[in-house]
Amino acid sequence: MTLMPVLASELVLGNERVRYFRMGSGPPLVLLHGLGGSSLVWHRNIGTLSAHYTVIVPDFWGPGRNPELSRLDMRYGFDFLIGFLDGLGIERAHVVGSSLGGLFATLAGIERPERVISITLVDSAGFGREIAWTDRFLTLPLVGDLLFQPRISGIRKMMRMLLADPRSAPDELVQALYEERLHPGVPQQMLAGLRAGVGFPGGVKKDIQLLARASEVKVPTLVIWGAQDPMFPPIQAHRAANAIPGSRLKFLEGSGHWPYLEKASEFNQELMLFLDSLKEQS
């Protein structure tokens, strides 16, 4: 895959094969994608960040993964993250989580702070039940089954749902995400995950909310949000930042649900400033 500046590696965890990308040297920095993405969505970040950190970007699901385990469940994602760190022999890491990945990062910051140096929550799930109506419709019988079928047009429609400017997604990424969804079971994994966490018409389900526990986060936290996020409204960013002790909040103008893709330079800069500040405090 030419999008990434480094070749993929593979880690066997139990009966699953996990693809991941690794680049750079220095403290470990793990980037976790969300429900509709893959490790490839971080292709504009890994090179810059690897100048100072060992950047590691795994896939939560995809080819080689067990569909029964790839579900929208806090405990699954938390166990995956800790197991992945164990599998690579990493004691502690900075963790950046996008959307669903942010949910898992938050739980790690609450329950296993000795494994997490810091967390960065990017348009994270877990801080409100509000979600775009398009996602609610996808949970309906037949509707999601039809629209989750792998098509280039479907990937482009997803980009229009997620991004402030869909043109910011390169054709290479659209093609790569489409090819990933051609693997047996991958669309079904994603749709099952969405239905497990989102209902119609209620929105994001209560059992994947962490706002009530956010005050228990015990590690330095940065909250970054796309100012034009059509998926999770900005009020959720404010809730997260207000609830997590000592956290920082930054909105990136002109970006939607994936600010690291649409505003990669600004995102990389804000993340580096945050991580550098932690070096100064240590």
Image (tube, grey):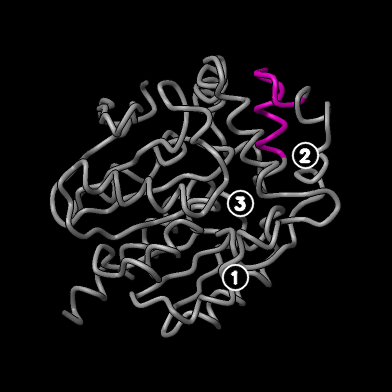
Residue 92 picture location, percent across and down: 21, 60
Q: Residue at coordinates 47% horizontally, 32% vertically from top-left?
A: 61
Q: Say which residue label 3 marks.
A: 257
For the residue carrying disc 3, how many other residues have a C-alpha within 10 Å: few (<14), some (14-19), or many (20+)? many
Please, what secondary structure does the residue beneath circle 1 have? Answer: helix
Question: Which quarter shows the C terminus?
Answer: bottom left
What is the three-letter code of the residue carrying label 3? His
Front one among 14 and 24: 14
Task: Please state, as top left, top right, bottom left or bottom right, where the N terminus lies in the image.
Answer: top left
Which amino acid type is marked by label 2?
Thr
Q: Which quadrant of the view contains residue 131?
A: bottom right
276 falls in the magenta region = no
* Magenta segment: 147-160
Q: Residue at x 51, y 58 (%)?
A: 103
Q: Which residue in the rendered view is the most extreme toward the right?
A: 201
Question: Which is nearer the N-term, disc 1 or disc 2?
Answer: 2
Query: Residue 172 location in percent, x, y?
Result: 50, 23
User: Who's the residue at 37% across and 68% down the image?
Assistant: 111
161 relative to 27 in the view: left or right:
right
For the point 61% across and 25% down, the residue is: 187
Label 3: which secondary element: loop
- Mark 3 or 2: in front is 2
Nearest to N terminus: mark 3 or mark 1: 1
Answer with mark 3 or mark 2, whichever residue precedes in sequence: 2
Q: Which mark is residue 237?
A: 1
| Foreground of the two, 120 or 16 | 16
Q: Secondary structure at mark 2?
A: loop
Residue of label 2? 139
Give how far apart the Cα atoms at labels 3 and 2 are: 19 Å
Question: What's under tag 1, amino acid-wise?
Answer: Ala
